[in-house]
Image: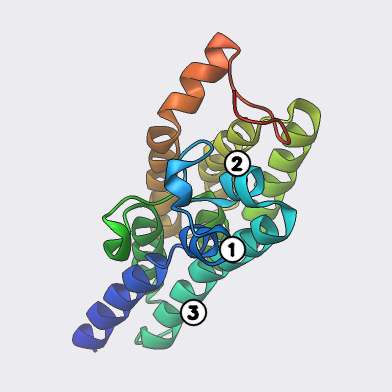
Amino acid sequence: MLLLSIITIVVGYLLGSISFSYLFGKWIKGIDIRKHGSGNAGATNTLRVLGKGPAILVLILDGFKGVAAVCLGIWAASGPDDIWVRVLCGLAAIVGHNWPVYFGFRGGKGIATTIGVMATLCFLPTLIAGLTAIVIIAITRFVSLGSLILTALLPFLIWGMDFPMPVLWISILLCAFAFMRHRSNIVKLIQGKENKLGQKRA
């Protein structure tokens, strides 16, 4: 059973490493999307470079990677209380998205995949944090700000709703991932130079 758990965690990483933003850039325009727009292989940059349709598909597919990885963990777990396997499978998918083995370890920022993982592990906290992020994005049009608020809220909501400790720990780690991956966005937000949703990159 330990071997099966390890295999599913590795599969979760390989699944997460599928960069739909990169693939759509190649299929639709024959470009490496990481060399255009913000340079990020994610849904927001896909919107900027390829348009709404591909961006929506990337958002959905990146989120589904997280859902599928956790479901693999549920399948591999020895029992309903074996939360660590599903948590590590979800974490592996996000690591794969951020540092994909297929694409030179240069991936996206992992927010959509994080949402997929956390919605599968703890739906209600993710729903509340997600709706809050949507409101923030609608008001400010800063996707990065909404993403950071989403990941920052999750640990508090999970702790307040008394979810298992492994879920709390992964939420804290994913918050750290998000802030690390958004370092340049944080600087631009502070300087007032961050691009807004729908705005062409300066």
- Foreground of the two, 77 or 101: 101
Is residue 80 among the parts visible in the rendering? no
Is residue 47 among the parts visible in the rendering? yes
| Residue marked by disc 3 | 71
| Residue marked by disc 1 | 28
- Foreground of the two, 113 or 58: 58
- Crowd around label 1: few <14 · some 14–19 · many ≥20 (10 Å): few
x%, y% of residue 101?
27, 63
x%, y% of residue 129?
66, 45
Q: Would residue 121 be found to the left or right of residue 93 on screen? A: right
| Residue marked by disc 2 | 150
Give the farthest residue toward the top. 191
- Colour scheme of the picture: rainbow
- Residue at image point 48% right, 50% down: 33
Give the farthest residue toward the front. 30
Q: Would residue 153 be found to the left or right of residue 33 on screen? A: right
Front position among marks 1 and 2? 1
Q: Say what amino acid the circle numbered 3 marks.
A: Cys
x%, y% of residue 60?
64, 65
**What SS does tag 1 mark?**
helix
x%, y% of residue 199?
71, 30
Q: Say what amino acid the circle numbered 2 marks.
A: Leu
Q: Say what amino acid the circle numbered 1 marks.
A: Ile
Above or below 18: residue 22: above
Q: CA distance from mark 1 to mark 3?
A: 31 Å
